[in-house]
Image: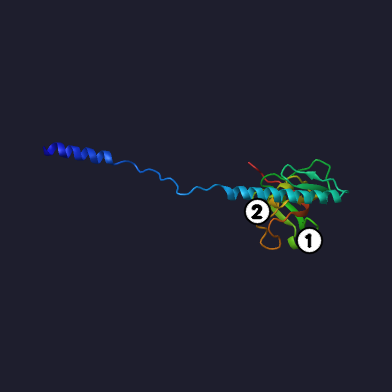
Amino acid sequence: MIRPIIILMLLASALSCKSPEARKPISHKSGSFINASVERNIKLNKKEKEKIELIMKADSDSDYIASESGFWYTYETKVEKDTIRPDFGDIVNFDYNVKTINGETIYSDEDIKPRDYIMDKEELFTGLREGLKLMKPGETVTFLFPSQKAYGYYGDTNRIGTSVPIMCKVTVNSITQTQND
């Protein structure tokens, strides 16, 4: 009689053990914050684009080109002969300034000084990094960057505030090609 009870108890204890189950979350988030943020950014982008288009229209002497990356540019000095453009790892020496979209100087050429930049291996704001890839040595280009291609929501924590579209005049002095294996 004791033997079937022991077998029954062992069987019951073996069947009562099971793997832990994942618990369901207590609260569900609707994603409304993200949706509101997307809507705000769409409106901001539209407003900045309209402002940039007004500036381009007022500057009728220049022919602005819309880049595939979402900014506009015009050549002050264009090199017509076929020369090199920077590639990954190349060293680009360039001068630039940063102005508000209305032309007020934020950083002058003297503030920034000529600098060397190792293409795509160092920090540089998105628009300028993409703009340098379009340039040849000796060219000067004026770029109009919406805030998301410039310093974005955070600014530069110094002179450029939140969501500020900017204008940059950039001159590429030289491009030193590196061996890319």
Q: Amino acid at mark 1?
A: Thr
Residue found at the far right of this picture? 61
Q: Secondary structure at mark 1?
A: strand
Relative depth, front residue between 109 and 2:
2
Judge from the rendering whether residue 13 lies leftward or rightward of residue 80; answer left or right.
left
Tell me, yes or no, if residue 26 can be seen here. Answer: yes
Q: Secondary structure at mark 2?
A: loop
Q: Position of residue 143 (x, y in %)?
A: 77, 50
User: Are the residues at dot 2 and dot 1 in contact (C-beta closer than 8 Å)?
Assistant: no
Relative depth, front residue between 92 and 110:
110
User: Disc 1 marks which residue?
Assistant: 105
Q: Position of residue 130 (x, y in %)?
A: 71, 47
Relative depth, front residue between 36 and 72:
36
Q: Position of residue 137 (x, y in %)?
A: 78, 48
Q: CA distance from mark 2 to mark 1?
A: 22 Å
Relative depth, front residue between 26 and 58:
26
Q: Which mark is residue 59?
A: none
Which numbered disc, 2 or 1, marks the residue closer to the eye? 1
Near mark 2 (Cα within 10 A), the count class, few <14, some 14-19 or many ≥20, is few
Q: Amino acid at mark 2?
A: Glu
| Residue in view at x 77 percent, y 58 percent | 99
**If the image is split into quadrants, where does the C terminus sit?**
top right
Q: How is the image coloured?
A: rainbow
Instruction: Choose the circle earlier in sequence order: 2 or 1.
Output: 1
| Residue in view at x 78 percent, y 55 percent | 101
User: Disc 2 marks which residue?
Assistant: 123
Judge from the rendering whether residue 38 lies leftward or rightward of residue 172; answer left or right.
left
